[in-house]
Image (cartoon, helix red, strand yellow):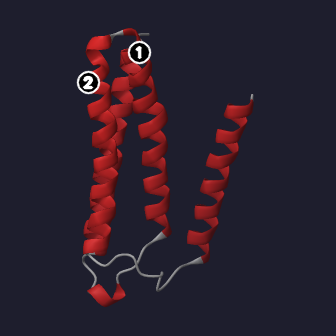
Amino acid sequence: MSPDVYLTAAIVFFGFLFAAFWWTLNRELAFDPEIRHFKFGFILLLFSMAVLAVFGIVIPLGNIAAHNAELLGTYRATVLAVIGVFGYMLTELGHYNIYQRPKYTTWQEYTFFWLSLAVMLMLGAWWTLF
């Protein structure tokens, strides 16, 4: 299968994650500003989006652009846009006063957050080293 298919799939997946960010933010905005807080789920979502953006979009597009000078502008624009998208999301979280310590959490939230993060980091390390 052509590498373009994988790049396209990564871009579509990134769009779904961006939509998930807005769904989550919209849900948090239903609460009064004084009880809004930064949930652990935001960390997982933003980290997942960063991993996908770098390894699924930016690096593959950079490799393609290295062999096709006509795509160098597209590559650079994509890098700038990814940075802008993350800046935008972080700015929105700040605008709506989401950067507050969690006001309520559950043991399940802690368990799945740390388990997910640990698995992501272990697999990332494994694939990098081997």
Corner quadrant of residue 73: top left
Residue 66 bears which disc, if any? Answer: 1
Residue for point 40% across, 9% down: 67
> x and y percent of residue 28 in the render?
31, 74
Q: From what the image shows, is residue 99 above or below residue 74?
A: below
Residue for point 29% across, 49% down: 85
Residue 113 relative to residue 90: left or right: right
Going by the numbered disc 2, the residue's amino acid type is Gly
Q: From what the image shows, is residue 27 above or below residue 1?
A: below
Residue marked by disc 2: 73
Q: From what the image shows, is residue 39 above or below residue 83?
A: below
The extreme bottom residue here reads 34
Residue for point 41% across, 81% down: 100
Q: Secondary structure at mark 1?
A: helix
> x and y percent of residue 72 in the render?
31, 20
Residue for point 27% across, 41% down: 81
